[in-house]
Amino acid sequence: MRSFVLACAWMAATGLGHTAWAGEEPSTSQPVSQPTWSPILLNVECQSDGRTKACPAFLRGFIDEIPLLRWAPRAGAQVVLYVSHTARAREDLVFMRFTSSLPGAPSSFEVVQGLDIQATDDVQRELLRPAFERGVAPFVAARYPDAVRVEFKIPAQASLADGPTSPWSYGMWMGGYYDWKGDYRDGNFWGGFKVGRTTRRSSIGGSVGGSYSLSRSPPLEVDGTTVSLDTDSYSVYANADGSVNLTPDLAVGVVARGGHEDAVGLYAGTARLHGGASYDWFAADDPRGNRLALAYVVGAQLDAYRKRNVLGEDRAIFPSHGLVAEGEVRRDKVSYRLRVSALSQLQPATGAPDRYVLDVAPEIEVKVGDHVDLSVRFSLSKRAVPGPADVDATDFEEVRRRSYAEPTQATMFFNVNIHWDRTDPDRNDRFSVAGSLGNLDPL
């Protein structure tokens, strides 16, 4: 009897032995599966330095604050946000270009927002947050339409009260290094000061600066002759320029330059004054950062040389002119830059110029894949510059410094960055200064 009661209790607990009565629904005790969702993975690429914390600090903060978004490395991101800045007076124009291959989402979406660089962080975030949300909303809606709500309202008519402003700017720079290893010492030091005034119609500016370098090492003995490898060099220079805009694209102006070098340098003194015009195809505050400009200048140059050159000159004054074209285009993963310049001495139609320099300097930066960034810069110069009439072959520094007269010069910079970004979205920059210890020589 006891066994029968236990068996009935077990069948009641497990549902066995139960017969459905007429009109009774069958038991549906199995759990119902709940729908799942995952955040949109978003990566932020800062393509230029701004004067605010917009990129990456503010934008990364917005991603952390919105539950539907999650930061991810570029290799795994579903949406990549490219951000660039353009300075306009006291405002930074922040250009945000969202790109994605999500099904149903636009391939790209662009938003521009101005930020007052003198405003507090909270005010800047309040301005940038709606612009960021407008940009990311189409991509979130492509995956989760019910997660995005659209609201229209009358735009606020209140304007930002103008604070104290000035067209003048000032700046200074300085730096250097010194390396000591017993009998070997090397150092280089530089600095300068600049001032400028810029308005919508005109600009004027100038700078002065200089540098000093030294090198000390044991001398060489060549065929019984002691050759010193010690070097000292310095230079000082000054620049000034001014321009007036005739139209939003066309400007005229002047450029003045002057300099002085040490006793082994090329110039005891040089002064150059040129005037000309330039034409720009993009607006000065283009938010993408694109540039395309062409300039022509003509003027005169006065040089006093440290040593008599192969033309028999220890000083020269001659007219010269130059043409410069410069452009930069950036789109998503690729940036293109190119500068082409030509400067030559003006000569009568029957004579060839004694002096000229032609230079082409292209540069390209490409984010090749999810883990590789590549940049290449190349400069090729062709020149005809009179060299010194004689060189002291036993003076190491004099031989080394005569490289300016070589007819061809090529310089190439190549950089590959291979990276596997962490997937943890948490941010922590504490103790990052310790990473600079890796730049020191090993003990």
Image (tube, rainbow, N blue to C red):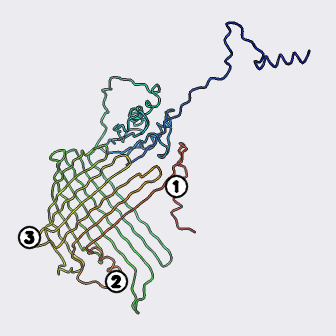
Residue 80 is drawn in which quadrant?
Answer: top left
- Seen in the picture, residue 357 relative to 40 is either above or below; the reply is below
Helix, strand or loop for disc 2: loop
Question: In terms of sequence position, does the residue under pointer 2 or pointer 1 come before the other?
Answer: 2
User: Mark 3 falls on what kind of element?
Assistant: loop
* Disc 2 and disc 1 in contact, CB within 8 angstroms: no
Numbered badge on residue 395:
2
Q: CA distance from mark 2 to mark 1?
A: 43 Å
- Which one is in front, 417 or 232? 417
Residue at 28 percent across and 83 percent down: it is: 391
- Name the mark nearer the viewer: 3 or 2: 3
Q: Which disc is residue 348 wearing?
A: 3
Residue at the disc numbered 1: 433
Residue 254 sits in which quadrant?
A: bottom left
Q: Is residue 165 above or below residue 190?
A: above
What is the spatial separation of the Cα atoms under label 3 and label 2, in whole angstroms?
Answer: 38 Å
